[in-house]
Image (cartoon, rainbow, N blue to C red):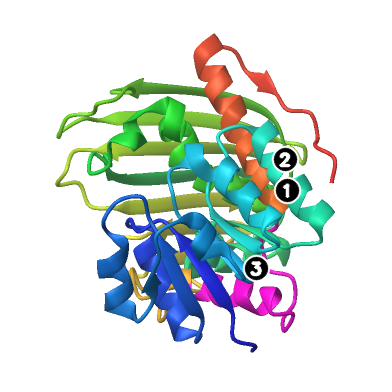
Amino acid sequence: MAQLDVALIGAGGIARTHLPAWTALGARVRIYSPDDRAPGLADAFGATAVQSPEEAMAGADVVDVCTPTDTHREIALAAVAAGANVLCEKPLALTAADAGLIADAAETAGLRLYPGHVVRFFPAYARLRELVSGGALGRVAVARFTRTGRYPTWSPWFADPSRSGGILVDQMIHDFDIARWLFGEVVRVHAQQRGHLTAPAPDGAVATGTAVLTHETGVITQVVGVWAPPDTPFRTTFHVTGTGGTARHDSLAAPGLRVVGGSGATVGGIPSGDFGESPYAVQIREFAAAFAGDGPEPRVSARDGVAAVRIAEAAAESDRTGRAVAIERSPV
């Protein structure tokens, strides 16, 4: 693979998962962050800290956007204007209109844009995709996804819906994307959220969200998200049932994935937390190969990122209005 020149914008928690993957691939990385964290992060991984986003992007093959969601549009468009491909953390933008604008700009410029929907790269979810697409579960009727983690009070912007979109957009978009990936376009969303939904969020704050998605295939998906108290362990689950069997996943269980056929026999499993390799590393290697022109198209596209924001936006509208929201099928 050709050596890539990468501009990493941001030096927070997600940047600290991306940077080791880039350096493991031999990329040259320049880091810019408006705070004082870039030099320490750069020193830890042999990267270079710079003083401005323009300096980071100059001559870059790829700009990796690891900043708060409300900054994604400006940074991603600047990257495209600089002639760079883009990896942008999820959500691609706060609104579907802005996400579509970024995708259109990259497409017009002949550049690649990939959203960081890393859950597609976690083994249990990748295996579930194989089971569903291969017909092992038969015709799927219902599915349930949950995602629980501590309320992200370490950065105040998460609790501010004008910056993050709140739990429906920031956290639950992971499973909105997975549901669409597995079961097809979403045509209707009914959602609500409760708890502490504004900034600032004190330690011990709790927020929950629930959404019911109707897919054009007829599958019904329930997505539950929780921002919980500090001592709550991170946990994800899914339960997918079709005419041919059921797949269950619990990230705190062992095995983490269990598939049961009509006879009740267990036919597969993945140990909890044993990924073998960081899903972030798998994701970035797949993107890097495409950026370098050495690999097939990755399993997630710019339009997937736009569609996920559209579902999350509909969920937020449903919560505001108390009504189900229909989603028109987006152009490809």
User: Disc 3 or disc 1, which is closer to the eye?
Assistant: 1
Residue hosting label 2:
100
Could you tell me the amino acid type at mark 2?
Gly
Q: Nearer the viewer, residue 28 or 161?
A: 28
Q: CA distance from mark 2 to mark 1?
A: 5 Å
Give the residue at x 61% y 38%.
Answer: 309
Residue hosting label 3:
130
User: In the displayed structure, does residue 291 sit left or right of residue 192?
Assistant: right
Residue 260 in sight from this viewpoint: no
| Marks 2 and 1 close (CB-CB < 8 Å) | yes
Q: CA distance from mark 2 to mark 3?
A: 29 Å
Boundaries of the magenta span: 281-301
**Vertical order, 283 against 25 (above or below):** above
**Label 3 CA crowd tier, 10 Å (few <14, some 14–19, many 20+):** few
User: In the displayed structure, does residue 152 sit left or right of residue 15?
Assistant: left
Q: Position of residue 302 (x, y in %)?
A: 70, 53
Residue 321 in sight from this viewpoint: yes
Q: Is residue 287 magenta?
A: yes
**Vertical order, 296 against 171 (above or below):** below
On residue 103, which mark appears?
1
Could you tell me the amino acid type at mark 1?
Ala
Could you tell me the amino acid type at mark 3?
Glu
Give the residue at x 63% y 71%.
Answer: 61
User: Disc 2 or disc 3, which is closer to the eye?
Assistant: 2
Q: Position of residue 226 (x, y in %)?
A: 34, 37
For the residue labelled by badge 3, is the local secondary structure a helix, a strand or a loop?
helix
Q: CA distance from mark 3 to mark 1?
A: 27 Å
Q: Position of residue 288 (x, y in %)?
A: 61, 76
**Label 1 CA crowd tier, 10 Å (few <14, some 14–19, many 20+):** many
